[in-house]
Image (cartoon, helix red, strand yellow):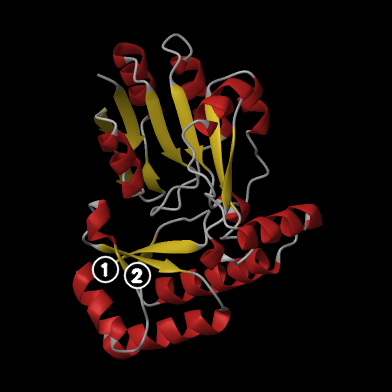
Amino acid sequence: SSKSLIFYPTYGEYSTACNLYGSEISFITPDHNKTGFIWDFQKAQHFIESNQPDLIFLCNPNNPTGTYFNNQEITALINSSEKSNTIIVIDEAYLDFSNTDERYTELIKTSNVLLLRSLTKSYGITGLRLGYCLGNSNLVSQIQHHIPPWSVNSLAQSAGIYLLNKNDKNLPAIQSVDIAKQYLTSALTEIGYEIEPSDANFLLIKVKNAPNTKMKLLKHNIMVRDCSSFGLPHHIRVGIKSLEDCEQLVAAIKNTY
C-alpha cells in the first residue's frame, strides 16, 4: 500500500525498485521552454502534502536532461515531506560535474534524506561500479539489513578508499569534460541543433528522430543514447569524454545530415 513519487524523465531503475515492492508510483513531469526542462515544485509540494508518499526519487543533476535542482527547490521538498515522514532519495551521481558549490550533506542529519553518490563518473572508473549512500543513522541501519553480502568487490573497495583519501577536487575527468562540453555545445548550436543546458557529463540534443539518428551515427562507430525509453523520442543523449571524441561526433553529424 506504499506510495512513491518520481521526478520524470529519469533512470528507469527507480520505477523498477518501486514496482518490486508493490509501491504505487506517481510522476512529476516537466514543462519545457527556452531555458530547458522545468519541473513545477509548487505542484510537487501540493502532491506531497495531499498524498503523503512514502518515498521520493530525485536525480540531481537529472539524467537524461542534465537539469540541476537548487537548494531552494530541494528544501521545499523536504519541508513538504516532514508531516508524512517521507524519505527523499537524491541521486547525486553526476553532482561533481555541476557548476554549483551547493551540497546537501548537512540535510541528512535532521531529515529523512538519503544521498546517493557515485565514484565511477568523476574518477573515470565506470567498470568498478562503485558508489555509496549517506543518511542519518536510523535510515542507514535499516538499509544495512537489506544489503547483500559482498555487494562491493575487494578491488572496488581498495580503489574507493584510495580515491577518497586522495580528496582531489580538481579531477582531470571533470576538467576535460567541461572543455569538451563547451566545444560540443557551441559546435552543434552553430549548425542548428537545440542543446539542453546540462550540469552533468552529457548533453541532451534534440533531433528529428532519435532511433534513426542513433543508427546513422553507429555507422561512424559512434554510440549515443536513444532517449525514446525516457519518453523523449526526439532526443539523443551524448556522453562527454574527450575533446577528440566530440570533434569526431560533430564531423559525423555534418557528414550524415
For this rendering, which residue is in front, 165 or 233?
Answer: 165
Residue at the front extreme? Answer: 149
Percent of width and height locating residue 44:
35, 25
Which tag, 2 or 1, sits closer to the chain's start?
Answer: 2
Percent of width and height locating residue 187:
46, 77
Percent of width and height locating residue 134:
61, 35
The quarter in which the N terminus is drawn is: top left
Residue located beneath label 1 in the image:
207
Q: Quadrant of residue 226?
A: bottom left
Which amino acid is tagged 1? Val
The quarter in which the C terminus is drawn is: bottom left
Numbered tag placed on residue 229 in the rendering: none
Residue located beneath label 2 in the image:
193
Which amino acid is tagged 2? Tyr
CA–CA distance in space, label 2 to label 1: 7 Å
For this rendering, which residue is in front, 162 or 87?
Answer: 162
Evaluate if marks 2 and 1 touch, with contact meaning CB atoms under 8 Å apart: yes
The residue under the point 22% across, 59% down is 228
Q: Quadrant of residue 3?
A: top left
Is there any visible trace of residue 208 in the rendered image?
A: no
The residue under the point 65% across, 39% down is 102
Is there any visible trace of residue 128 in the rendered image?
A: yes
